[in-house]
Amino acid sequence: MDLATVLIVEIFYSIAVLVVISAGLAVVFGMMRVINLAHGEFLMAGGYATIVAVNAGINIYVAMLIVAPLVVGLIGLVVERLVIRHLYGRLVDTMLASWGLSLVMIGLATMIFGNTTTGISPPIAGFAIGGYQINGYNFFIIVVAALLLVAMYALLAGTRAGLVARGTMQRADMAAALGYSPDRVYMVTFFCGSALSGLAGGLLAPLVGLVPTTGGTYIAKAFITVISGGASIIVGLLSSATLFGLVSQLFTFAASPVVGEVALLVAAVVLLRLLPQGITGRFFRGRL
Amino acid sequence: MADIVLETRGVTMRFGGVNAVDGVDFFLRRDELRCLIGPNGAGKSTFFKCLAGMLTPSAGEILIDGQETTGWHPHEIARLGIGIKTQVPSVMDGLSVRENIWLAALRVLGRQGADGAVADALERLDLGDLAARPVGQLAHGERQRVELGIVIAARPWLVLLDEPAAGMTADEIERLAAVIAEIGRQAAIIIVEHDMQFIRAIARTVTVFAQGRILMEDHVDAVMADPRVRDIYLGKKG
Amino acid sequence: MSGRPQIGATLAVLGAFVLLALAAPAVLETYTLTILLIYGLLAMSLGLVWGFGGILCFGQAAFYGLGAYSYAIAAINLGESTLPFALGILVPFLFAGLLGAMMFYGRLSDVYLGVITLVVTLIFFKFMNSTAGPEYAIGQARLGGFNGIPGYQTLNVPGDPDAYIFGDDFYYLVVAIVLVVYALLRWLLASPFGRVAVAIRENEARVELMGYDARLRKTALFAVGGAVAGLAGTLFASWAEIVTPGLFSLGQSAEIIIWCIVGGLGTLVGPFVGAMLLGYLKFALGQQTLIDNTLVLGLVLVLSVLLLPRGVVPTLGQWVGLARRRRPRRASRRRLRPARGGADG
């Protein structure tokens, strides 16, 4: 019984982590058809921003939830203006340029922070369920992931800004004809996506020992979660995160964390072979 | 019935809830030239794509030369000796006119035969001066001609053409009609077409599509004179 | 058709390469030159599938690593290098063929192709990293996890396990292999198979309507690319005398792509030159600690995507082409490749 509870919590937790680490990428890919391969490094930057802020005496929640998103959002803004802006509509070129960017960021982080592991401790203590120890911080991540999805949905479906953004992504020319500058919309969307990546980095900071190459562990997972989700941003994100979270956690329990990771990757390959348009290319079509 | 080269039985193509093609029975005789006409959305292009293997019909079957080809891939259909030209000029932009046509001839005739077939196609379509130019640099009508060259260089016995006259100048259309008449001497042809003048210039039998079904099938003059056709087709046009 | 001018260009490239390869040891150690050539070979493998086949593979490192590991594992078990050498090419060839068949018969589009190749590379990386325990062994070869596999038989003269090929000899062997591979690939690209492959890159639907099976041909091209990458991996294994999971890393895949981008797609020489240049840059940067290596590589990639969308070699070719058109007499004796067309070189 205890084991079942722990297993369920762990599954929800691994789904939540996938949602959190993929949200920024999903917004940028879903809305702008830009694949940002520097996404992992955006997470890494969010993590460093959090740690630096905490070490400077800022409250950890402020650091995670406000400082990290702002810092990475601003980095995203600069990146969009300098690089991405010139490559809209060239999917492969954006992928390559942002891959280059990711290397630049790793290099910068190595020069600034050195090639050593830094970290902070989670702000919520663990507790026991029966004979099993559970990390209290995991619940926090689950709650944040749920709130994040609700907030994204509310913003896109319920606000004027969300509508303008969706309209621009569908038909930039029409939006321009209606008086909205696509350039501005892209910029703001990229800022939001980057801020989400920063938030994810902040949230993960207490969980991982941060090194400049940390991003590499997340990019692939985020990438395949988003791509497997397909065209719909929120439903796609949630459905593929659920599937992959479930698969990886079950295999982790049954065998080992490495097998869990490999199972996730294999599941992604099989899924894309069967559903080349992603999950929402076949199911839940036309949803947000 | 030995002279029937292409036959469809109840071919249906559903998109969502709509039957774009709805139970079409159709046949074509050897050496026949047939035009498919109809207003936009009548289903003629969708039907064409089913024949060419670019779409797999939701129901019904297609027989080419007595062989069932329903659900075959385009390359398998083409391998039966069928030349296909799509609606939008589909050519290899980065390659020269000569290379485009050579690749088509190569598969059928091998390296020895290909060069002759290329020269022949270039001549018949008056593309000789453009042979070395990358196709991407050519005008729309010229690209249409290149694609026709690709089709005839493979020496097909059945040719499927989707709107070959689209975007051509009056001169080019005239020459196109002559080329098609010449192809018609060795092959059966199905042409999907909008341009009524062009149809008059080349066609004998015309099949009229409306709302996914065959409305009528008759000689071009009879079709033109039919009030139903005028209603659904010409009526809408003007 | 159009075969003869290409033979001329190919011979010119081969001749220039031989001269440079003979002169280069005066400037750099052959040990360094050898690895640069291996990088060049690896870059050519991606240049083939990406530049000519239009197949963007984010996981060329998978075949490279697979070649290296196949060689190392077989060499430990067999103790003589001839068969391992063949396996180092054959295993990646077959694996690329299988993977390619899965992707191309599934008709996956560009982005998904990128994801799958990337993910497959990651699977290898994660798996190899986790094989530290003694239970992970193939024959007498322990996979060794993060530490990799050391201490296997390096290349020897076929049939004589004690006659190692190393140092300058190994360098000249790699030079010869590069020559042969380049010539074979040029021949392949000039053959009907190669012409159709380029046509598929240009317009897959049209080629299918001509009656060619694009899926089969893309799979075959992908497999050939895998074999060449595997050959590079095999040579690397013999050069480095240790294989580690790092061969399968994303960084390795990124580097191969960067070589191709910087050198220029649509040619074989471009990626090769790109790999040699950047490989040397990396080597030179490795001698200092002021600027981080990765940072420079990243900057090079970003800038070349933004400023040199065609890559160095085609861009140079274009300038030469322009100069030649402006002053036809002076340049008329040089038979450099045309800059347009993107299917030569």
Image (spheres, coloured by chain):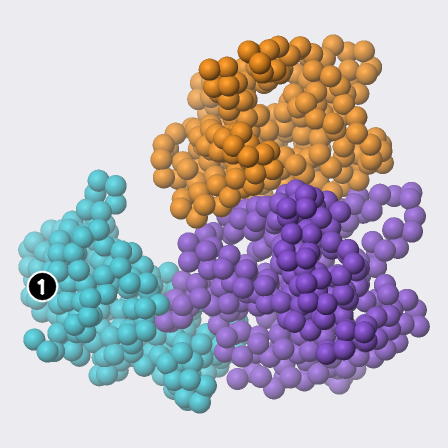
Q: Work out whether residue A165 or residue A38 is closer to the camera in this orientation and state it.
A: A38
Q: Residue at x 52, y 38 (%)?
A: A264
| Res. C192 visible in picture | yes
In the picture shown, does residue A76 fall above or below C287? above
Q: Residue at x 73, y 78 (%)?
A: C158
Q: On the image, numbered disc 1 is attached to which residue?
A: B217
Tell me where residue B200 appears, x and y as whole percent: 18, 70
Q: Work out whether residue A211 or residue B112 is closer to the camera in this orientation and state it.
A: A211
Tell whether A196 sits left or right of C300. Answer: left
Q: Residue at x 74, y 27 (%)?
A: A209
- In which quadrant of the rendered view does residue C71 lie? bottom right
Q: Work out whether residue B173 or residue B135 is closer to the camera in this orientation and state it.
A: B135
Q: Colour of chain B?
A: cyan
Q: Secondary structure at mark 1?
A: strand
Q: Which chain is orange?
A: A
In the picture shown, does residue A97 fall above or below A111? below
Tell me where residue C343 appears, x and y as whole percent: 59, 70
Tell me where residue B149 appears, x and y as whole percent: 38, 76
Q: Which chain is purple?
A: C
- Image mark 1: chain: B
Tell whether B64 sits left or right of A235. Answer: left
